[in-house]
Image (cartoon, rainbow, N blue to C red):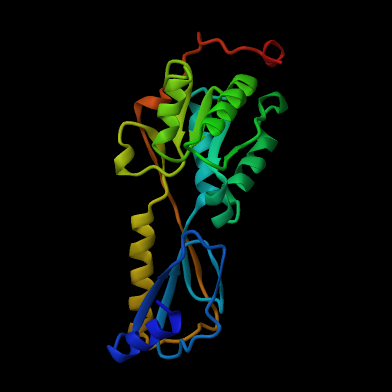
Amino acid sequence: MNPRRLIEIIRARGIGAVIFEHFMEREVDLSGLDLSGLAMVSVGGARLNPKLHRVEVNHYGNVIKLIKKLQSRGYQRFGVIIPRIFERSSNFKRSAALHSEDLNIAEADHIPIFYREETDSKKDLKELATWLEKHQPDCVLGVGTDVPHQLDSLGYTQPDKVGFAHLGWHSSYEGYAGYNPKWSGAGKVAVNLVVDQLTRNENGVPEDPLWVLVEGEWGDGHSAHPVLNQRKRKSKSTRS
């Protein structure tokens, strides 16, 4: 539906509050719409014009906390598998966090991110196998239910051969370890921000837009058990 027409319908029905969801877009232009009289919040990582109050899960902070958690369990070499389209839509926040953490990780344990273009193609699976063989991560961080199954098919069973933690964990991934971004929490915060505006009779484009980050939480699972001290990892020299 045309955005202008949608705003007209909202006004005709006497709706005074709107929550925008922009999960896959990087930039959204609303400058051509009459937003006056509406209490508004945006959910997602898109940069909006004009700027509105915005609620987002903390991709950057969640990755750093996840790595710290996994390090406390004995993992040292983190290989990240993520569709490029997901990173592009979040302005590469997770990638930025990983590069930041490289400063705290031994250079020999740095592994380049495996950006996926097509997650279900034979070419992609072959490239994934090559990446795993070359870099030999002791823990893989990924997005999607297909990653642990593909690891299994390539001989990297979890947690025996490699650890696995989900970057976007939620209840449907129960049993796997990972970090829950708390999207449901982001929704609750967005509603609270809208109600707060209605209570104070604030509407339209805000003079001082807020940017609220919702903290995630660790979800335990069988795929990233603590690494035993006796577990030996191949040295970098034996892989090259």
Residue 108 x/y as whole percent: 70, 24
Left or right: 205 as drawn, with respect to 234 = left
Q: Residue furthest front?
A: 122
Residue 52 position (above or below residue 141): below
Q: Quadrant of the N terminus?
A: bottom left
Left or right: 107 as drawn, with respect to 63 = right
Q: For the point 43% across and 79% down, which residue is it?
A: 2
> Camera-side residue: 234 or 217?
234
Residue 126 position (above or below residue 22): above
Left or right: 43 as drawn, with respect to 17 = right
> Camera-side residue: 138 or 76?
138
Q: For the point 61% across and 45% down, which residue is it?
A: 95
Q: Quadrant of the C terminus?
A: top right
The picture quadrant where one finds residue 193 is bottom left
Residue 155 position (above or below residue 44): above
The picture quadrant where one finds residue 16 is bottom left
Q: Residue furthest left?
A: 13
The picture quadrant where one finds residue 224 is top left
Residue 89 x/y as whole percent: 54, 56
Residue 212 position (above or below residue 146): below
Residue 49 x/y as whole percent: 57, 77
Left or right: 97 as drawn, with respect to 174 = right
Q: For the point 39% across and 37% down, which residue is it?
A: 145
